[in-house]
């Protein structure tokens, strides 16, 4: 692919992030992600990425980049202010793949704006895999000048569970954020919310229950807009009910030890508390 700015954020297993930045102010340069080969002597530390005909600078991550490593999970958070035509790539250690991805927008300054502000997606997201090296990258293609943040959790999987590029997980953001293997649940029942009730000490769980079922149904039907809206609503309901977000993290862990319905609730809790 031809670009003028490529930034590869290589996340090591200990959480340290190294930056490899390729830039050209005169002409686009060629870069690729290699999905089906092992590295050669000519390849660099950022393989499976390869970059041609331009110098690549190496530097440490800035204070806006945060990572946390815990129990075969890596939490990664960063803020970006970048020009149009850029590519940001987050490269994980071997056997780590994205489990939850969230974006945070910065509000527009309303000066000089009249009426509704129309927007279009300012970029596109890819998830690429090299199964031979068990390497995975989240790649953000930025089409417009942009100020935004990203939060994600990557989990370590076995060699057998590491995806191919053809794997359906790579096709849809919500397939990554809330895995479709949990969507064989018919419905979330009130009794499934017992652990949540113990956390937020709320006896009326009707709205929480209904919202979870709306999330489930929206994901099953592929209505990503409604799913995102309901996830936001669920997050507000849960956050309003507890003053300690750490309790919700523990609650999510408790749900992940249960059956399919509980695991779905646990994944939703992980998403809204990230």
Image (spheres, rainbow, N blue to C red):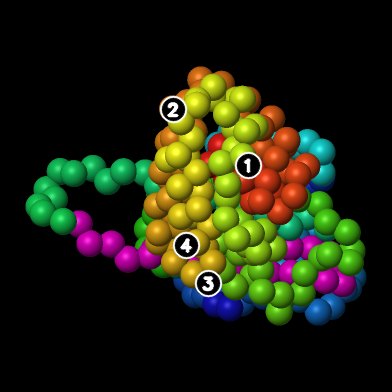
Q: Where is mark 1, residue-wise?
A: 192
Above or below: residue 227 compared with residue 193? below
Q: Where is mark 3, residue-wise?
A: 3
- Tag count: 4
Q: CA distance from mark 2 to mark 3?
A: 44 Å
Q: Relative to the observer, which residue lies in front, 139 or 229?
A: 229
The answer to whether residue 16 is seen in the rendering is no
Residue drawn 57% across and 29% down?
197
* Badge 2 element: helix
* Badge 1 element: helix
Magenta segment includes 82: no
Q: CA distance from mark 2 to mark 1?
A: 20 Å
* Badge 3 element: strand
Tags 4 and 1 touching, CB below 8 Å: no
Q: Which residues are magenta?
A: 117-139
* Badge 4 element: helix
Q: CA distance from mark 2 to mark 4?
A: 23 Å
Is residue 132 rendered to the left or right of residue 112? Answer: right
Tags 2 and 4 touching, CB below 8 Å: no
Q: Where is mark 4, residue-wise?
A: 218
Q: On residue 240, which mark appears?
A: 2
The answer to whether residue 115 is seen in the rendering is yes
């Amino acid at each position: 692919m031809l670009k003028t700015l490529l930034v590869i954020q290589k996340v090591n297993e200990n959480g340290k992030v190294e930056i490899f930045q390729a830039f050209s102010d005169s002409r686009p340069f060629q870069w690729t992600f290699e999905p089906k080969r092992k590295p050669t002597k000519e390849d660099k530390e950022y393989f499976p990425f390869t970059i041609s005909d331009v110098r690549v600078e190496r530097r440490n991550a800035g204070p806006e980049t945060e990572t946390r490593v815990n129990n075969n999970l890596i939490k990664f958070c960063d803020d970006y202010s970048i020009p149009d035509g850029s590519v940001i790539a987050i490269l994980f250690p071997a056997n780590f793949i994205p489990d939850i991805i969230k974006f945070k927008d910065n509000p527009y300054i309303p000066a000089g704006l009249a009426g509704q502000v129309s927007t279009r997606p300012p970029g596109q997201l890819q998830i690429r895999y090299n199964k031979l090296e068990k390497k995975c990258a989240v790649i953000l293609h930025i089409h417009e000048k942009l100020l935004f943040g990203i939060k994600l959790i990557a989990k370590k999987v076995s060699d057998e569970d590491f995806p191919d590029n053809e794997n359906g997980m790579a096709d849809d953001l919500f397939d990554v954020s809330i895995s479709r293997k949990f969507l064989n649940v018919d419905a979330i029942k009130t009794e499934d919310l017992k652990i949540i009730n113990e956390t937020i000490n709320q006896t009326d769980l009707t709205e929480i229950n209904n919202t979870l079922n709306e999330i489930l149904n929206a994901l099953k039907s592929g209505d990503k807009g409604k799913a995102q809206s309901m996830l936001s609503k669920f997050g507000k309901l849960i956050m309003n009910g507890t003053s300690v977000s750490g309790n919700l993290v523990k609650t999510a862990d408790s749900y992940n030890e249960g059956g399919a319905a509980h695991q779905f609730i646990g994944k939703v809790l992980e998403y809204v508390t990230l």
